[in-house]
Amino acid sequence: MYAKAREVGPELFPELTPDERKQKLDSEIARLQQEIDLQCQIRDEITHDSEDPNIDENEKAKLKAKIENINDKIQALGKSI
């Protein structure tokens, strides 16, 4: 992740000094990682809810669809890093 940022950073922020560019990239990476962590937490909570034996199959299907959407979002965020 950091290697890729070092590689393309000068192209993304040519107007910044190396230190400013590093700070900006670090900030962006931290923001993306925080969003990934949040989505993982939400996915884990929904997964736990979907395992409740008291919910009906229709609700389980809805929860599984939400889990798939979150997995797609996590994958997209991971590719952004």
Image (cartoon, rainbow, N blue to C red):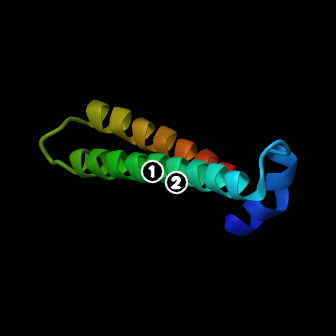
Indicate whether 69 appears above or below 34.
above
Q: Dots 2 and 1: beta carbons under 8 Å?
A: yes
- Of residues 61 and 70, the one nearer the viewer is 70
Mark 2, residue position: 30
**What is the quadrant of the C terminus in the image?**
bottom right
Q: What element carries label 2?
A: helix
How many residues crowd around disc 1 within 10 Å: few (fewer than 14), some, or many (20 or more)? few
Indicate whether 20 appears above or below 62.
below
What type is the residue that disc 2 sits on?
A: Ala
**What is the quadrant of the N terminus in the image?**
bottom right
Mark 1, residue position: 34
Residue drawn where x is 84% and y is 53% of the image: 10
Q: What element carries label 1?
A: helix
Say which quarter of the image contains residue 73.
top right
Residue 49 lies, in percent from the top left, at 22, 45
What type is the residue that disc 1 sits on?
A: Gln
Q: Residue furthest left?
A: 54
Query: Is any atom of residue 81 visible in this view?
Result: no
- Of residues 33 and 66, the one nearer the viewer is 33
Residue 30 lies, in percent from the top left, at 52, 54
